[in-house]
Image: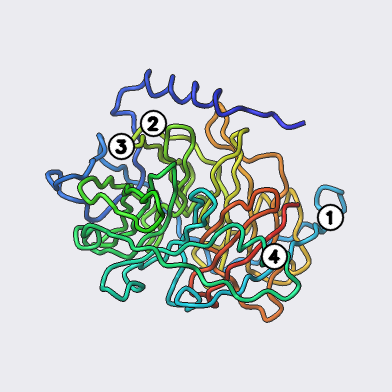
Amino acid sequence: MRNEITVVQILIILGTASCSRPASSVINLGKVSSSPSADQKGINTPTDAPKDIDVQTPAPFPPRVVPTTTSPAVRTPEEVPVTVISLSGPLSSPDAEISGMAWFGDSLILLPQYPERFDSSGGSALFMLSKSDILDYLDSPNPNPLQPIPVSLYTSGVEDSLPGYEGFEAIAVDGDHIYLTAETKPKGMMSYLISGQIASDSGQVRLDASHLTPISPQTELSNYSDEALLVFGSRLLSIYEINGTALNPHPIAHLFDFSLQPQDNLAFPNVEFRITDATPPDDFGRFWAIDYFFPGESKLASPNDPLAMQYGVGQSHAHSKTVERLVEFQFSEAGIVFADTPPIQLRLRDDGQSRNWEAIARLEGRGFLLATDKYPETILGFVPSP
């Protein structure tokens, strides 16, 4: 039986922790080569300096460990096929590089990594799809491609105020408020948390460039940042991409209040490969995240995959180094922990091409919506609940 923990209980726990600890207890892991000036206007600087950590360089690409025991717990699990939802219009281009998505009422907001590529007026744009159109597509025997509707995004010059700007990576929505993370690499990696507001008619989104909160990386690896962002009660929570045992022995998830001020952090479990996005938690504090591995990223390879050892490896995964799966986590008194749920392993493509899943959203009562960036192409997919 699941140990179900309600949101109210967790909020009491988190509220007690934040009241009993001084602001200086905010943990910041990872050495950053270049950080913003302390007097940079509107930036919420953490209360203590980032700490150096020892990053272990993995050996050359190790063989994949596949369970051989015949224990029922590790028999070959059934993989779940991905139903592709065809798209038309600008977002169907690989240049869209979808990096996140979130629900605003019954509208699904899709976040391109570089929204400035998609507004003919010289501005920026997000995109929306209605839930009813998605459901009609899935229920139709011969559906027509869906064309996401562009929504004007006024960034207030955020891109210009962030040296080494490399696009937006995560999105979360609470009411009519929107929260994004942006990735930068002026010298070392750094993420920034940004807030904004969605117009009541969904016609435009405006970001507030006057308040930007830096999020320090937890390793010195290039091109990795906090790519999952979710709302939990009255807090925002961001999750770093790399949480494997060798590269990030003691991972944490960053907590912020809605004014983007850093709060106490939560322990996060060691999980191999890359966490690229996560759903909001349900009423029991459980949420799903994408866990992805592309064989070309040999620095992220691991000779041990505890989830595979515990739950087994699906048929297509057993013949590939690629990993495409959804993993369920839950909030607890110990921080964030694995839920007692087997991962959802996605059936890999027959052509051997890995799908770089970068966005996930629940489709209530049905399952999950997933989206890739440009590799191997723009894909919006549906995965049914197990």
Choose between 365 and 133: the one closer to the eye: 133
Q: Residues within 10 Å of mark 2 (few under 14, many from 20)?
A: many
Residue at 55 percent across and 37 percent down: it is 336
**Of labels 2 and 1, the one closer to you:** 2
Q: Earlier in the sequence, mark 2 or mark 3?
A: 3
- Which residue is the site of mark 3? 259
In the picture, measured across the screen, residue 162 lies left or right of residue 177, that is left
Above or below, 5 relative to 295: above
What residue does disc 2 label? Answer: 264
Above or below, 249 relative to 94: above
Which amino acid does the dot numbered 2 rest on? Asp
- Res 112 → quadrant: bottom left
Residue contact between numbered discs 3 and 1, judged by CB atoms under 8 Å? no
Which element is circle 2 on?
Answer: loop
For the residues carrying marks 4 and 2, which lies nearer the camera in this image? 4
Disc number for residue 138: 4
Mark closer to the chain start, 3 or 1 = 1
Going from N to C along the chain, the mark reached first, 1 or 4, is 1
Q: Dot 1 corresponds to which residue?
A: 75
Residue 384: quadrant of the picture: bottom right
Q: Which comes before the other along the chain, label 4 or label 3?
A: 4
Where is residue 237? Give x, y as percent.
Answer: 44, 41
Three-letter code for the amino acid on which mark 4 is drawn: Leu
Q: Which residue lies at the image location 41% right of the left edge and 40% below the top edge? A: 254
Marks 2/3: CA–CA distance: 14 Å
Task: Name the kind of residue labelled 3 in the image.
Answer: Ser
Alpha carbon distance from label 4 to label 3:
38 Å
